[in-house]
Image (tube, rainbow, N blue to C red):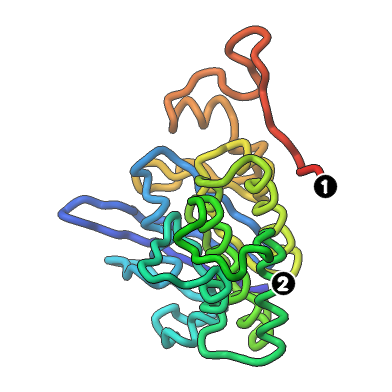
């Protein structure tokens, strides 16, 4: 089966410096891949290339077997959705209006139902009429995630499951909503959506990803299952951290890795 997204030998340069050097990545339908690595490793640059926002100096990207550059912007929006690390809204839109932006110019009962489902997925149904700028940073991020879920649903209805790209989606969320977002992403992948997510939290990456790709200085340092990539060897080489896996540095210190949220 052809991958949903395939990037081959991607090189990106800026100011004479290589931000990515010959990076290749394929993601299958229903697969969740976490991109991890130290600051400046090239994670966000790679995500921008996969989204079509950034054109590489060399290399090729294909989405569902077609060159990414062959998609017109409106068509591309029906095949891939992107959640940025931070999205700023300058106008007093309500949460419901922001979420509906994921549907573009589509209207009707079906879109209404999909928008309501997206709001419910992020537990913001009661915030539908609130001005988004009055919400906390985490609540705003959840609203934008709902917008992306609606965009995915619209594209899926027309063309089947697509590609979901996430840049640090849990950074501003509390512990419960981090897990809720991971569960929502899991529901997407079970429908056949291919997911690529940048995650700094290696515990969350190990918990949620089928495969982890470790980037370091613009190149792939390791790639494989969490058990193959979250190791003392990789963390020592890439992050400069010793004896980090399955150990508590201070005797008696708690180590928290929740596997699910309680339901009231």
Q: Are marks 1 and 2 in contact (CB under 8 Å)?
A: no
> In the displayed structure, would residue 16 be above or below residue 207?
below
Give the quadrant of residue 183: bottom right
- Helix, strand or loop status at disc 1: loop
Could you say which quadrant of the image residue 176 lies in? top right
- Mark 1 lies on residue: 263
Relative vertical location of residue 107 with respect to residue 123 in this rendering, above or below: below
Residue 73 x, y percent position in the rendering: 42, 84
Determine the residue located farthest toward the right in the rendered image: 264
Residue found at x 45% / y 61%: 133
> Is residue 63 found left or right of 91 in the rendered image?
right
Mark 1 or mark 2, which has the lower sequence index?
2
Query: Residue 11's quadrant in the figure?
Result: bottom left
Q: Quick one: label 1, few (<14), some, or many (20+) residues within 10 Å?
A: few
Instruction: From the top left corner, tell me how far across and down residue 244 is, in percent.
Output: 57, 22
- Above or below, 54 against 74 in this view is above
- The alpha-carbon separation of the residues under discs 1 and 2 comes to 18 Å
Q: Quadrant of the N terminus?
A: bottom right
Front-lying residue, 217 or 115: 115
Question: What is the number of callouts on the image?
Answer: 2
Measured from the top left, where is residue 148 in percent x and y?
56, 69
Q: Residue at x 62, y 75 (%)?
A: 150
* Disc 2, SS: helix
Residue in the image at 64% along x and 57% along y: 32
On the image, the x and y values in percent for residue 215 come to 44, 45
Task: Name the disc covering residue 178, or none.
Answer: none
Label 2 sits on residue? 117
Look at 56% across and 72% down and name the residue there: 99
Residue ranking furthest to the top? 251
């Amino acid at each position: 089966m052809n991958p949903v997204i395939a990037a081959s030998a991607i090189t990106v340069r800026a100011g004479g410096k290589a931000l990515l050097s010959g990076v290749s990545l394929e993601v299958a339908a229903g697969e969740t891949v976490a991109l991890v690595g130290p600051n400046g490793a090239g994670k966000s640059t790679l995500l921008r290339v996969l989204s079509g926002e950034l054109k590489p100096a060399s290399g090729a990207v294909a989405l569902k077997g077609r060159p990414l550059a062959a998609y017109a912007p409106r068509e591309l929006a029906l095949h891939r959705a992107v959640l940025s690390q931070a999205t700023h809204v300058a106008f007093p839109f309500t949460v419901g209006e922001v979420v509906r932006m994921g549907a573009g110019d589509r209207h009707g009962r079906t879109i209404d139902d999909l928008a309501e489902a997206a709001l419910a997925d992020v537990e913001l149904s009661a915030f539908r009429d609130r001005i988004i700028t009055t919400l906390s940073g985490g609540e705003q991020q959840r609203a934008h995630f709902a917008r992306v879920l609606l965009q995915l649903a619209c594209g899926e209805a027309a063309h089947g499951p697509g590609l979901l790209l996430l840049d640090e989606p849990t950074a501003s969320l509390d512990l419960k909503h981090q897990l809720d977002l991971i569960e929502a992403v899991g529901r997407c992948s079970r429908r056949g959506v291919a997911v690529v997510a940048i995650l700094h939290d290696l515990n969350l990456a190990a918990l949620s990803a089928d495969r982890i790709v470790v980037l370091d200085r613009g190149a792939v340092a390791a790639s494989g299952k969490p058990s193959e990539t979250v190791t003392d060897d990789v963390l020592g080489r890439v992050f400069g951290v010793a004896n980090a896996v399955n150990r508590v540095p201070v005797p008696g210190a708690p180590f928290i890795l929740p596997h699910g949220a309680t339901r009231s």
